[in-house]
Every structure is written in structure tokens, then in C-alpha cells.
Amino acid sequence: MDQPEEGDSLSFANRILQELYPQIPTPFQRQPQNQTAREEAFTKNEIARIMQKVPIKKAPGYDGIDFIVLKTIFRTNPDILITFYNKCLSLKCFPNPLKTGVIVLFLKKGKNKSDIKSYRPVSLLPTLGKILEKLLLERLNHHLRRNNLQHPNQYGFRTNRSTEEAILDLLDKINSAKNSNQHALMISLDIKGAFDHLQYTSIKNSLDNLKYHSNTLETLIDILSNRKVAINTSQGPATWNQQQGCPQGSCTGPAFWNLVADEVLQQDWPQGVHLQAFADDFVFLVNAGSKQEVKNLANKALQTFKTWTDKHKLEISLDKTYYLHINKNRSGPIWYSGIKWGQNSIKRASVIKYLGVLIDDKLNFAAHLSAIKNKSLILHQGLKNVAGTSWGLSKNIRRQLYLTVVEKVILYASAAWAHNITARQQRLLCSIQRKFLLNITGAYNTTPTAALQVIEGLMPLHIKAKMQSTLVRVGRLGRNCDYEGTHFDHERYEQPSPPSTIHPALFSLEDRITHGGQVPSNRTPTEVYTDGSKINDQTGSAFCVIAKEAITKTWKAKLSPANTVFQAEMLALKAAIEWANTANEDVNIWSDSESSLQALKSFNVKSKITQEAQMTLLENARIRLGWVKAHTG
């Protein structure tokens, strides 16, 4: 952009906003619905759960009110915020002052400083509005989960979904095609400024299609009207209307994008065509017996996808869109051109980066490990700049940096690439690890790598990668796995459960569970004491019922030695809660496991046992839980 005249920062800021947020011919106009269902009012517990999670170090919006101030207000006089948010809900109104975002520009890496498109505009929104967004989103997500309205091929911004799962599912499809003696074509699509160009009419139509006619939805839709952006200057703020796009920094942006993206994921794709997405990162996998069939299927699928992007006024970046051909034979002729986006050809690549992992046409991840090596050299140089063997950071801190930063970067998505690692790749990982071990120990360069690993008690990287791969596959993704001759059946391990389908306003266990030394205000004639323990590789759970100073019932169960103490404690609590539910009287249940009580109070838990105990507690308000100190009499 042209440089501003001397002292004229206001007009320069206005030009920036006009360039970043162009006006559209027909801006969104809200049409309120008169007949909508009225959901329950926001409860104190509902707002408290949001307040507990918000970070206190986030920058505030134009009003200067940060989350520390809001938390203080809520702690001292919660009725102020409860009344305000419920008034917004009843009026189906998202206040206009809370829709103004202060824009801060961040230069993208390796971009031209003089081009405004090289900057990422981040919106600093008022914290009052962010809390309201989170409250509304919690209810929208509850509706989506309860009615199973989210497409399974969308992995981004969803509970219990991850990049590793998206990568593994894609690789499974590729390997399945190869095992069926078919050609496979992977097409990675990059949408230009997906969040910045998302049309408000597209969001409104996607929300309407949910058939969720309520004051919650109407308040969410009101976010889209009268949005403004501002840049602070020495001459005052420059303001501009934002008529499209979700502010980068808003809570609703990712959810709105997923709703619009679900439309294309739900298309009736022909056999041999698979489409998946992680937020705005779309990837096609097309497979068929011949190259011509693959080509025809791919072009047909791309035309359908283009129809969707045209409908929602989105564009793809051809410079960042590639296809990768995985030949059904190890050797064969190079793939010919002919994959089209409209009238333009899509470029062929031998390697495609998908969610941080480099996938090559041989599926041996040689390119990915080479990239890991280059990245590790940069990390090692950065560590050497702040810590030598005899100066700078202490040995313990260098070791901690290696474990918490370096290993995490190197082993990212190891579930995808480390399971069938070759001997050559093992040596490469050892050479990467060696540099850091020398820096940590200060040993001579001639010291064997194995000796360095033993001295520091650090596991070789290739073993750590395989172990982490097995852990993720079995424990998080629910897949069977073999490691070093041992078969791991995922059904023998507790899997993360789907998110709870309890309405946020109806979850009220925070008022009935005390811990940290607090004692329930009322004692009951019947009280239950629970315990779970692990001694000498023996794990068990038990509870006893005491009424009129006499033990009237006992229960115990032996668990597998592999079960954790937490599982044992939670099983004892669950059994006690189920018994109390049949007692037809007020019952206090006591446990010495503070972590178990805290889990029962949490709205979003992944443990199936915990969720089942919560459902029973919500059905019976006569059961209360409390904490007692262990091993005291």
C-alpha cells in the first residue's frame, strides 16, 4: 500500500480496513423469527464453568475490560453478569458494542511487508462478548451432539478428534486402495482466506438447516449483524463495517465454518471418492482400478466441490493446491496431467504436507523424517545459543527443554509414521537425538550414543516414537496394535467417551459435591464410605454403608492389575451412587479421592464410568458427595 501522508495515520488505517474487509453488494440483514422456543435461562454454574476456563492473560477489546476484571465481578457479585447474559438471551440480542473488534496485524512468515495481504488480522474482541459467545456455543454444541448433526469426516474443532486421527484415517484409505491393487489420488485443497471470506448468508442458512428454532440460535445469528472492526491510531480509532468473514480471535468462527463445510462433506460422493476436512483443510482421496477411472472420478468430484465454493463465494489457491499419485505398483509410468479445477490444471507433487506430516508417493515418510532432521538442527542451534555445556542454562533445564519441546516437535504425529519404521530411519532418529544428548551432558563428541542415553536415562527416539504410536492408536483412537510381538486389543482399555449429551443448564452437580476439606452442610442418617486402591499389583474397589453407627451393607470388587487407582476409586463411587439411588432416602457418600470428586463435578469428562455416575446423580437430588481425609481415624 502507498505510505500515508505525514501525520495522517487515520486515513491510512481506514485504507487498511477497506482493503482487508471489502464491502459486498448485498450485506446480511437479520430477519428475527417471532416463533422460537425459549430455552432455560443461563445458570450460575453454567457461567462459572466458562469463567473457570477463560485465560487471564488474553488481551482485552476496545473497552479495556479483561478476564481478570470479569472474574472478580463474578466472584463478588455474580448476579450482575447472570442478569446481563439472561437479558441478552431473552431479547435474542447480541449487543452491538460487543461486536466491535480491534484489529492487530501480524506479518506472515516470509511475506512482503509492503503488501497488506501479507498480514494476518487478529481481532481483539470485548471479553463480555466472548463469554456470551461461549455460553451460546455450549448450547449449540449440545444440540449438535444430541442429534448427531456433525459429519464424521470433519476432524477440526471437535471434542475427541485430532490431527493424528485425521492423518491415520487418510493413510488407512490409501493403504486399503493399494491392498486392493488400485491407483490412489490424493488432492489437497487450499481455500483462500476461508474464515475471512465466509459469507454471513451461508452461516445463516446453515444454522436454519439445523431446525433448532430457539432464542439461543437467534442470539447467535444476531452476532452476524452490525459487526465492526477498528484500528487505533494517534488521531483516534478508524472503524469500518465487517460484512463477511469471522474475526480471527472469535469463539464462534470455527463452529460457523464447520456448519458451512458440512454441506460439502454430506454430498453423495460416488464409490471411490473420499473427502475429509480438518477445519478449512480439505483433502480428497480418489481410488480406482485404472488411471483413467481415477482421473474421471477426480475431475467429477472437483467439479462438485467447485460448485460448493462458487455457491458460498469461496476461492481456492491454485498455487497451494496439489495432487499426489500413489501408484498401485511400486514402479510404473509417471502420472500424466489432466486433473482440473475449472479450466486450470492442478499441479502434481511427489510430496504433500497434510496437517504437518509430509506424505510421499512411496508412503515411506522419508521426506517427513528429512524435514524433522532439518527442524531439529534449528532447535539445536537455538538451544546452543542460550546454553552451552559450561554456561547459560543449567543441565536440568536443558534436559527439561529437550523433553518438553524438542521431543514433542520431533514425535508429532508419530502414530502415522513410526509404526513400521526402518533400521535406517532408526539410525537417523538416533543421530538427531545425539546432538541434544551431547548438549545436555557436556560429554566428549566420541562418547557413544547408547552411553549418553543410559547416563541421562532418556529413551532412544525410535523406541519412544513406537511407544507413543502404540499409545495413541490403542488408547486414544481405539485401534488394535502389535508392538514388539505383543498384541494390544483396544477393547481391554478404557476409551475416551463421546461428550456428554446433558443440557448445560441442567448440569448442577457442582452444588452437591464438595471437596478440598469442605463438608456437606447436612449430615444424613445413612452414609456411605468408598475406597479404591492398588497394592502389590492388586487393584480393588469397595464401599460400606453405615446407618445408626452400624455397617448395614458392604460391596467390593477386584479389578485387573492394569487398572489405575483413579479407575478403582471411580468404580467404587459409581457403585455407591447406584446403591444410594435405590435407597429412597437422603444419602451422603464420602470418598478420599479428590480427583474423582472433581471429575464428577466436571461438565466435560471423557471417562465412561464417570459419565454414567453423573447421569445417576442427576436423576436423584437426594444424593450428595463429600471428601474425607485418607487414613485418619
Image: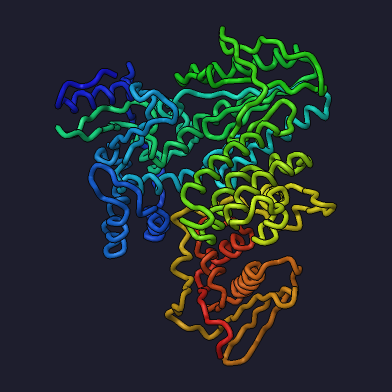
Residue at (55, 45) in percent of width and height:
380
Question: In the drawing, does residue 62 fall left or right of residue 373?
Answer: left
Query: Against 239, is 390 above or below?
Result: below
Query: Against 208, is 301 above or below?
Result: above
What colouring style does the render use?
A: rainbow
Q: Position of residue 182 (x, y in %)?
A: 80, 22
Q: Quadrant of residue 81?
A: bottom left
Residue at (67, 67) in percent of width and height:
564
Quarter the C terminus occupies:
bottom right
Quarter the N terminus occupies:
top left
Q: Position of residue 71 (x, y in %)?
A: 32, 58
Nearer the observer, 170 or 417: 417
Residue at (62, 38) in percent of width and height:
372
Query: Against 394, is 188 above or below?
Result: above
Nearer the observer, 379 or 234: 379
Q: Taking the image as drawn, is residue 472 in sight? A: yes
Q: Position of residue 386 (x, y in %)?
A: 46, 50
Residue at (54, 57) in percent of width and height:
400
Q: Position of residue 524 (x, y in %)?
A: 50, 83
Count of labels in the image: 0
Q: Quadrant of residue 2?
A: top left
Q: Taking the image as drawn, is residue 271 in sight? A: no
